[in-house]
Image (cartoon, rainbow, N blue to C red):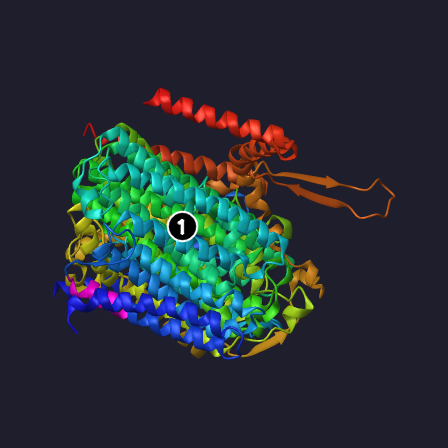
């Protein structure tokens, strides 16, 4: 197969996905629809994945095709270059494994007709966003992705919470698309060249450039879940079926990041240094607030959704650093920061997909999302527990899995930044670095809580004690992701090399070739400065653990007796004596929550002699909702109430209103001309 | 030849840290006891304790999972690998380039991750309280440590520990405010991470005051021996780390002759002795604090370390 054929092949895959969506509408009544649709989607994504990977690894040149669709004078431009090939890999990898998982998980779906067609269309939409090479088809694909995912959020529409989530998602998504529309309007300029090639050639004034940046932050940032535009995300992601949640959190947020990179790094032209400050501030705040909110959750899927916000924050810190270096003419450093961000994009797609699939496995085995009802699942669902543990280790940035490798690169990028000339960045970068370190430690705390409460300990409800391991397809999808997390962790150089063409294209600089390094180390700048070898660290850990285990089992007393738990001599068999998710987070809530959420604890003790129970209440406030969204919602509400009177006028009043409006508009027209 | 030498040093180092760790713990206990006018246990008591634990049968709670039994080995391995990467008596360790200071911090983070999970595995209230408080302490101590690493990396121009140690000996580093702040922060982190007074009490058996001991409450026999050994290694690691980064004098360079190695070993032993003595002195002269005072203590460490890093960022433009 020659390289030239990549783009048509991927387009065929996308077309196949759209056809699958149509076929799913027709098929959805039949029994066999679920395995057929997911199986076909799996194959289509796998083909697209292989093709994009081949394009990426072969270092093939960009290819563009103009399809006779869309606006007649524009056509639909589709293009594959290094950046889009990279994101095509992310999209189709996530898509393929979510489809594989769906073959098993989808059987539990009560109304498959509400999921199947939209699932395939969602995959097609995300592919199309990444492929689009003109503003019109980009926005069309973006809107397709948004609307179809909205339909998926509404899959279980009888739950009022889901309808509310879908409503908020719809409003935010429309607002985001509107911002992107305006951004592209500005980029296209008065001549209206909507082709990306024309946009790249045009130059914007610095003020307009800053405006486009703000609009891109609002549009793509709200889709990615950047604080404070994130409010829809923790509501909508958990509401969808779990493999769709995995796609929304693991992949769709990455497509949003693709949109942001495409606009700001590719189309917008040379950046100003202070843009980096804005990105660093948004990124740092998202990282910290995201993970703190995650720590306070008891709903497993909502917790994972908040943790996505944290990871998006980390990625935006990387992008901010890349912009800062790029604006100061340091292409190698900028390439390092962008590589760290893109590596984290890839990693997050892997482990967040894995964790959501794990949450879905727990959900289908027990019907529960509430951590407080779980416990001891490691005994009942051994493989799921193992996979979830691997995901938790990876997301907590512990070596030798992949999360650590990208975090390490990010820290290396921070350590180059004293060379930046601007004082603003000199203060901002170490602060963002500290926020990143703080959030990394909090992530570990958060996932100790999740795994410890859900999978360890004793069952907290009867249904959990009877849980059964999930089907083979779901397990295969999760184990494949575990394997990928390990491989990306111990061979980070391969992923970094695959990212370099994109960095070269966007920033004109790249890291040294990593696969040429001895022992497969990664060396971002120079060996004297820093290097990391995931493979060796992995071998060391396995070796020393193995030697210790062998020696101890040879030397020491090997007898092992099972007995009741010790618990300082007062074991209580009641599972409610265990720590709960809420009590686990209490110390952290006291340390950070009093500031971030205005957390207040109240203890109501009964009067002495009264045998009634004491009560403990925690109040937390969502400050972002209260300060940013509640006022807007209030204004809309008041305006709607006032305007409500217009519904009950007589016909004469309506006619006079129409007349006045017409006269007013004509006057405006006259004055304007 | 040089490779074989380095490899030998690397393996010697792995064995040295393992062999010395219980001795350091015994030394600290002995000094503490003598300062309190007690006789104290013999210096070699920790070795005897470990051997005694290894001889006993392991009692495991009925509902403990495989994680409970595997965790001690994972904790030990992660701590051991981290300790083996810190130069003790010689720099130029064979594998020092495979992992830098950030990796060492993360390896200790892995050990803690599994320790906290092991504490929650049986589902007792003490395990939960220990794990919950441990992650609270770590959530502040770890970023403080990363910030100290940043400060040193900016001074030495590298995150490799061997390079940092070499730079600190040879280059004209001089007295810097950042270094001082970083050292104070690192000591505070070390005290918290090793569960020493005033953050935690390694000798306590009052359940409500313990963090580390609460997590390992369910362990016995060989599992407990491995976990105890890991805790001793961690103490040694922090003393070696502070010595290698802030007092690297006397450390043998890569490929130096036997005399240099002998000098390195002697100075290393002296540094351990001084470190252990100061720790014991500090521990007897301060009372344990309430658990919710700990965030203030560690928050101060984080702020000091952040200040040190910010100063480095500022001064780089003049230097």
Q: Which chain does tag 1 point to?
A: A
Q: Residue furthest right?
A: A609
Q: How many marks?
A: 1
At horizontal 62% and vertical 57% (from top left) the residue drawn is A159
- Give the image quarter of residue B301: top left
What segment is highlighted magenta in the picture?
A50-60
Judging by the rendered image, the residue that carries numbered circle 1 is A311
Vertical position of residue A249 compared to residue B290: above or below: below
Residue A456 in sight: yes
Vertical position of residue B295 compared to residue A309: above or below: above
User: Is residue A357 a member of the stretch shown in magenta?
Assistant: no
Vertical position of residue B42 compared to residue B169: above or below: below
Q: Nearer the viewer, residue A268 or B58?
A: A268
Q: Position of residue B67 (x, y in %)?
A: 51, 69
Q: Nearer the viewer, residue A245 or A413?
A: A245
At horizontal 37% and vertical 47% (from top left) the residue drawn is A314
Q: Position of residue A248 (x, y in %)?
A: 44, 57
Q: Position of residue A378 (x, y in %)?
A: 55, 70
User: Is residue A56 a member of the stretch shown in magenta?
Assistant: yes
**Under tag 1, what secondary structure?**
helix
- Give the image quarter of residue B141: top left
């Amino acid at each position: 197969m020659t390289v030239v054929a990549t783009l048509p092949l991927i387009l065929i895959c996308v077309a196949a996905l759209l056809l699958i969506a149509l076929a799913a509408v027709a098929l959805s009544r039949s029994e066999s629809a679920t395995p057929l649709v997911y199986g076909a989607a799996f194959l289509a994504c796998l083909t697209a994945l292989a093709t994009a990977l081949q394009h990426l690894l072969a270092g093939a040149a960009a290819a563009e095709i103009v399809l006779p669709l869309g606006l007649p004078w524009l056509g639909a431009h589709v293009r594959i270059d290094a950046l889009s090939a990279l994101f095509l890999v992310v999209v189709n990898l996530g898509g393929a494994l979510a489809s594989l998982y769906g073959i098993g998980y989808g059987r539990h779906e009560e109304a498959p007709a509400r999921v199947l067609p939209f699932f395939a269309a969602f995959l097609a939409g995300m592919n199309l966003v990444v492929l689009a090479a003109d503003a019109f088809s980009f926005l069309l694909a973006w809107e397709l992705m948004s609307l179809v995912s909205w339909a998926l959020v509404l899959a279980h529409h009888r739950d009022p919470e889901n309808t509310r989530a879908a409503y908020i998602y719809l409003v935010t998504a429309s607002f985001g698309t509107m911002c992107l529309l305006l951004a592209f309007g500005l980029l296209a300029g008065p001549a209206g060249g909507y082709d990306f090639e024309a946009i790249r050639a045009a130059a914007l004034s610095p003020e307009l450039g800053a405006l486009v940046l703000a609009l891109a932050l609002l549009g793509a940032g709200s889709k990615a879940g950047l604080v404070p535009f994130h409010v829809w995300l923790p509501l909508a992601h958990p509401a969808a079926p779990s493999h769709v949640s995995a796609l929304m959190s693991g992949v769709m947020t990455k497509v949003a990041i693709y949109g942001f990179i495409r606009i700001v790094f590719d189309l917008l032209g040379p950046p100003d240094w202070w843009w980096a400050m804005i990105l660093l501030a948004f990124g740092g705040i998202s990282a910290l607030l995201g993970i703190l909110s995650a720590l306070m959750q008891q709903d497993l899927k909502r917790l994972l959704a908040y943790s996505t916000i944290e990871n998006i924050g980390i990625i935006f810190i990387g992008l901010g650093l890349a912009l800062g270096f790029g604006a100061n003419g340091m292409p190698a450093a900028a390439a390092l920061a962008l590589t760290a961000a893109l590596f984290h994009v890839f990693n997050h797609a892997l482990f967040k997909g894995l964790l959501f699939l794990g949450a879905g496995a727990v959900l289908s085995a027990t019907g529960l999302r509430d951590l407080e009802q779980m416990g001891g699942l490691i005994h009942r669902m051994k493989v799921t527990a193992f996979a979830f543990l691997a995901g938790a280790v990876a997301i907590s940035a512990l070596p030798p899995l992949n999360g650590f490798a990208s975090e390490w690169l990010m820290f290396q990028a921070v350590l180059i930044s004293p060379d930046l000339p601007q004082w603003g960045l000199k203060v901002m970068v170490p602060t963002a670095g500290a926020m990143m370190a703080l959030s990394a430690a909090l992530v570990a705390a958060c996932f100790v809580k999740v795994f410890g409460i859900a999978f360890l300990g004793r069952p907290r409800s009867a249904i959990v004690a009877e849980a059964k391991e999930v089907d083979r397809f779901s397990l295969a999808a999760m184990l494949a992701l575990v394997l990928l997390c390990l491989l990306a962790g111990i061979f980070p150089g391969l992923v970094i090399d695959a990212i370099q063409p994109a960095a070269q294209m966007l920033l004109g600089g790249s890291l040294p070739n990593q696969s040429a390094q001895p022992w497969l180390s990664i060396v971002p700048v120079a060996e004297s400065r820093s290097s990391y070898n995931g493979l060796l660290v992995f071998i060391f850990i396995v070796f020393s653990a193995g030697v210790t285990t062998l020696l101890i089992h040879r030397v020491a007393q090997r007898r092992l007796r099972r007995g009741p738990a010790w618990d300082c001599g007062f074991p209580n068999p009641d599972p409610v004596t265990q720590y709960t998710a809420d009590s686990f987070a209490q110390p952290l809530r006291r340390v950070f929550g009093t500031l971030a959420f205005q957390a207040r604890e109240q203890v109501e003790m009964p009067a002495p002699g009264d045998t009634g129970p004491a009560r403990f209440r925690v109040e937390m406030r969502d400050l972002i909702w209260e300060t940013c969204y509640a006022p807007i919602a209030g204004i809309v509400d008041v305006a709607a109430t006032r305007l409500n009177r217009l519904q009950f006028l007589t016909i004469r009043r309506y006619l006079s209103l129409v007349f006045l409006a017409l006269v007013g508009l004509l006057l405006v027209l006259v004055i304007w001309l | 030849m040089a490779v074989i030498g380095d490899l030998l040093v690397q393996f010697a180092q792995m064995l040295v840290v393992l062999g010395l760790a219980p001795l350091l713990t015994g030394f600290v206990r002995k000094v503490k006891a003598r300062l309190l006018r007690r006789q104290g246990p013999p210096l070699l008591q920790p070795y005897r304790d470990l051997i005694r634990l290894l001889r006993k049968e392991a009692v495991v709670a009925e509902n403990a999972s495989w994680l409970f039994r595997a965790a001690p080995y994972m904790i030990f391995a992660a701590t051991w690998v981290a300790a083996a990467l810190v130069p003790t008596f010689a720099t130029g360790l064979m594998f020092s380039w495979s992992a830098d200071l950030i990796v060492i911090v993360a390896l200790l983070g892995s050990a803690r991750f599994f320790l906290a999970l092991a504490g929650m595995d049986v589902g007792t209230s003490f395990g939960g309280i220990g794990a919950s408080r441990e992650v609270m302490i770590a959530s502040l101590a770890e970023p403080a440590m990363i910030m100290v690493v940043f400060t040193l990396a900016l001074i030495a121009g590298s995150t490799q520990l061997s390079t940092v140690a070499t730079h600190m000996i040879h280059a004209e580093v001089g007295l810097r405010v950042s270094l001082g702040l970083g050292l104070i922060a690192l000591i505070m982190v070390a005290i918290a991470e090793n569960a020493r007074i005033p953050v935690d009490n390694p000798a306590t058996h009052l359940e409500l005051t313990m963090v580390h001991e609460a997590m390992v409450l369910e362990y016995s026999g060989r599992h407990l021996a491995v976990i105890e050994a890991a805790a001793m290694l961690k103490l040694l690691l922090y003393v070696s780390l502070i010595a290698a980064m802030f007092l690297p004098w006397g450390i043998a360079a890569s490929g130096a002759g036997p005399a240099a190695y002998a000098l390195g070993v002697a100075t290393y032993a002296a540094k351990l002795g001084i470190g252990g003595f100061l720790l014991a002195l500090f521990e007897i002269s301060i009372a344990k604090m309430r658990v919710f005072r700990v965030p203030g203590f560690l928050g101060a460490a984080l702020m000091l370390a952040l200040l040190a890093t910010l100063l480095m960022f500022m001064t780089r433009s003049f230097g």
